[in-house]
Image (spheres, rainbow, N blue to C red):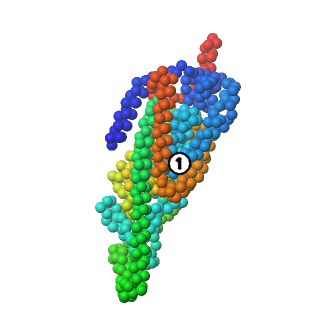
Amino acid sequence: MRTLLFFAVLFLFLAHAAGSGGTCSTGINYTCPNCGGYQVEDCLNCDGYFSTDQDHEICFNRRLFQPNNVNPTDYDNHYHYLWNDIVAAFVWFIMAGVATACGVGGGGIYVPLGILLLQFSPKQASGLSQASIFGASLGGLLLNSRDRHPEDKIRSDSGVVSSEKELLLQKKNTPEEDKAYEDAGNVFYTRPLIDFDMALFLSPMEMAGAVLGVLIQKMLPNWLYLTIAGIVLSFTAYKTFKKFLQARKKEKRQEGQADASVGVEVSAEKDVELEENVENGSGPSDKSEQEKIKSDTGKETLEEEHVKQLDEEQLNLRKDYLKEDMRQYPKEKILALIVLWIGLFLLTLFKGGKGVKSLVGINCTSPWYGVLIALQFLWMFGFAIFFGLRIVKKQATRLQVKYPYLPDDPVWNPKSLRFYGIFTFIAGIVAGLIGIGGGMVLGPLMLVMGIHPRVSSATTATMIVLTSSSVAVIFVTSGLVPWSYAVFYFFICLIGAIIGKSQIDGYVKRTGRASILIFILATIIAFATIGCFVIMFIRLADKEWCFDGFNKFCNVETGNLCGITRLLGLKEQK
């Protein structure tokens, strides 16, 4: 709570500073090739030519892998970032695998690198980051969708009351009890690694926050945008480093347990000798009596767990629920996620954006523009409320038949629904505001919920696919990010995530040391944070430490500038 209060106060202070500032002039004007050429201070105001060539002071339409052309008047081909694109392709490929393996989208890496390496403007780097996150998280989703839950021996026994949670938890059984359960003709159940129910509730909340974040970012001056990004990324680096320390501590504890297992093996050998002595007559002589005791114990366990505690009707219902939850690809839930995304995408196309005409011919000056924004939020909030209430009802129904929940399953009730929904909405705002996927914020949230780390990572990746894709569509359709860059780096990150995550997961399984990856990620984010502040100070120095104020939310310049330019030219001729 204190952290949220700190960020709120800091944002109000920065907002006041931005509000008190006017429009700063750099003293440098760039030639926009529209209408025969006119001067702009920011190439983001030059429709169709959003990239800036600082050396020749012109705006141009950037193209992927295009070689240098020294002709300063050739606006379409004037380009000198060929090697930047080549080097960035390799960097993006590697980072996608590392970020996906660590359970984050990687926006904290892509945004600063987009500014420093690819030399995009901050807002362009943010849009490219979302396309990259979409590709990487989709690659992670393809891998996670095939995996099963870490707990693959869920029994149909009734859950027991726990002092830790408000749920009935699966009883901890010994290997002998599990064997007796299986010998009795019962089956073990499991679940998919992705928690689709949680995704159906949290995804629309995060997407709503992402839409709001993009709307806010549209009004922010670059210095304020970079400051917020730097602060959030520094906080993320700190949290990631703490996660590294926790992971390393856990690894050392596991290594100690592995050393202790040597003593267990020695004890097991003694047990074998004891069994041999029994068979040779050194132990209890009545072997038939031992078998009778074991048989009676097995009978008593089966009767206690399968007959006495629940009637046949409850047992059958519980098995039906376990079978339903065991489906690897629940079609109705996957279809619901697709419907959610399509609804948001269509509303975005109807609303339109900078550089992209609305399908219904409106712009931000029309009252229908606000109506469509409101419909976006109504669609996502309505979706979240519907599936949130459905999750609460589903859990209540299962509790009636003593469904055996796992210790890391979340408790769903109206109170937890509000808490998780609000925090996920805030995570979405951060994602849309600074161009990250939201995993760096949602990860700690799910740990607070007590979710298993692997389930948390897989579910977060699924949610990031929806969030990053919707935000990427908004950025790319706005014209700020060239289609060629968005598509190319999408596939680079998709392939990098699939190959990199597979290799890294294999390495971690062989060595058991995943903490080194978290440390590398924390280090990269820390350098990215420094990069944000360095870029901000350099740009402020170029403007002689003048702080721009907020941009206009609605600024319809496209289509009018040519007329204004011609009108001014006619006046000068007169």
Residue 477 image offset from top left, x and y in percent: 57, 39
Quarter occupied by residue 572? top right
Position of 437 relative to 502 (above/below): above
Q: Residue at x 53, y 40 (%)?
A: 110
How many labels, in total? 1
Q: Disc 1 marks which residue?
A: 98
Residue 375 image offset from top left, x and y in percent: 47, 43
Quarter occupied by residue 307? bottom left
Residue 241 image offset from top left, x and y in percent: 43, 45
Between 173 and 201, the one nearer to me in the picture: 173
Q: Is residue 66 visible?
A: yes
Helix or strand or loop: what does disc 1 sit on?
helix
Q: Residue at x 57, y 21 (%)?
A: 29
Q: Amino acid at mark 1?
A: Val
Quarter occupied by residue 56? top right
Q: Residue at x 49, y 45 (%)?
A: 520
Position of 120 relative to 132 (above/below): above
Between 261 and 202, the one nearer to me in the picture: 261
Left or right: 181 in relation to 352 = left
Residue 432 image offset from top left, x and y in percent: 48, 40
Position of 68 relative to 98 (above/below): above
Q: Residues within 10 Å of mark 1 (few under 14, many from 20)?
A: many
| Quadrant of the rendering where the C terminus is positioned | top right
Q: Is residue 379 visible?
A: no
Which residue extends farthest left? 163
| Quadrant of the rendering where the N terminus is positioned | top left
Which residue extends farthest top? 574
Q: Residue at x 45, y 70 (%)?
A: 188
